[in-house]
Amino acid sequence: MLCTVCKKKEATVHLTQIVGDKLIKVDLCEECAKEKGIDDPTGFALAEVLMGLGVSEEAGQTASQTRCPQCGCSHADFKKTGRLGCPKCYEVFAEELAEVLKSMHRGARHVGKAPRKKQRARSVEERIELLQRKLEQAVAVEEYEEAARLRDEIRTLKKE
Amino acid sequence: MNLLDFLVPVEELVRRDGPEGCVVISSRVRLARNLEGMPFPGRAKKSDRAKALERIQEAVAQLPQMEGGLIRQMDSFSSWEKQALVERHLISREHAANGEGSGLALSRDQSVGVMINEEDHIRMHALLPGFQLEAAWRAIDELDTLLEERLDYAFSAKLGYLTACPTNVGTGIRVSAMLHLPGLVFAEQINQVIQAVNKLGLAVRGLYGEGTEALGNIFQVSNQMTLGESEEEILAKLRKVTAQLVEHEQNAREALLEKKPRMVFNTVGRAFGTLANAFTISSKEAINLLSVWRLGVELGMFPGVPRALADELLLLCQPAHLQLIRPREMKPEERDILRADLLRSRLAAVARPSLPPNHSDALDK
Ligand SMILES: [Zn+2]
Ligand SMILES: [Zn+2]
């Protein structure tokens, strides 16, 4: 069996992982495995290697010219390295990331620990999202009075 | 200070036994965190890296967990010292390649550590012997909670802790158990088991040699998903799967003794023979044979020999641990000779294998 990366040498490292709901097999030669840092069983995720190889199909077509204003990272940079440049990148590439995240993780929304300092801000954001959903529902069933009230409440929260 | 003077001596380290230590070598929980408004290390300019390093180092130094610990920049270690830290699972291989602008903090007992400017600004971990995932989570959660008061983490309500690689975003947690599974490998059940674990969304890592044989029959099981599940849920899943793997491994060992005792005793006996009598041996061969010998020790074939001796030799046979006891840089061939010398002398006092007490008639079957 030949190495998936260099397609030259005999593969001796065989890895299987679930990425999203797909079972992915990668076969690497000793050298490529070393280069990818995966001769160390402690520190890698196959998804990272695959993204580096451009194996991820979904990310394939939509590469845009957008760059992160904070760090200069482009979508092409992200595709090449599988890494984002800074926290702001998550907002800038939110659309492209949504697909990637969906294929990697169980959910699209964080559940779990939050820094104590961020908890208040977080609850406000959550409240806004909840109201927004209620607003959509109210519009859908043509309860315009309720919708107007919800809209005002969202506005006030956003100003905080 | 010399790194070796700081590291817990190997013979002491391996005597820290944990629950289910015969199968679960260690339990680890790591968290990935980044600073708000700063480029991630991979994209940061030298000055930004230095700034992040300084801020984090300062905050980490104030943690009570780091009292009497070590806080250093990566360029202050020799490459062999960094390699030894990798062999002890205290840093990643990627971090060993880092120098100026990256740092490391380790607690005095080396149960918790913080890598600074690895792939993320902060990679903190707790590492405990045996099956102690819960305790490892508590230890690192506590450290994280103290650290977040002193630093502003990049965090979004929707996506959680923001990390350089989207595979870690959300909780930024990786819970993992390092397992010794020679029984499942010998019984040729390991592939099935790995596939079953994969189906649960967990990763099984390990260096695969020919076929299904991992180096030293050592496997690491960990979560891959970090978004949409809480730390507790992830922890509970790993705890459950690890407990099942321990049970499978023990069943496999029992079944092997029951059905193929001669194969088991033959393999263990030969492994011991080579280890105790070789005059040159590569680290790969030594690790694979020591893994088999460790199984023999646990099966009672070497009465009076503690498992800790196998674990001690497993660590001492690794290249950097061998190199660091010598003042002069050795060639790989010289290390192979030194490794064999060490094994011969440490195993000289170990009696040749005998059949375990309750299996003395096993071979008649
Ligand atoms: Zn290759
Ligand atoms: Zn950015």
Image: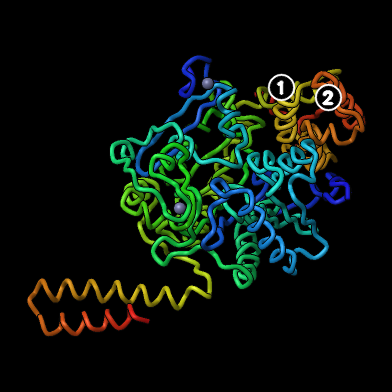
Other residues around mark 2 within 10 Å, as few (<14) / some (14–19) / many (≥20): many
The subunit carrying tag 1 is B
Left or right position of A12 against B342: left
Residue B170 visible in rendering: yes
Tell me, what colour scheme is on the image? Answer: rainbow
Dot 1 amino acid type: Asn
The location of residue B166, given as percent across then percent down, is 45, 49
The subunit carrying tag 2 is B
Left or right position of B254 against A64: right
Which residue does the image show at 53% across and 63% down from the upper left? Answer: B36
In the picture of the structure, the residue carrying the numbered disc 1 is: B266
The location of residue B321, given as percent across then percent down, is 81, 36
Which residue does the image show at 83% across and 49% down from the upper left? Answer: B7
Which residue does the image show at 43% across and 43% down from the upper left? Answer: A78
The location of residue B172, given as percent across then percent down, is 51, 56
Mark 1 lies on a secondary structure that is: helix
Q: Quadrant of the C terminus of chain A?
A: bottom left
In the picture of the structure, the residue carrying the numbered disc 2 is: B335
Residue A144: quadrant of the picture: bottom left
Dot 2 amino acid type: Arg
The location of residue A111, given as percent across then percent down, is 42, 64
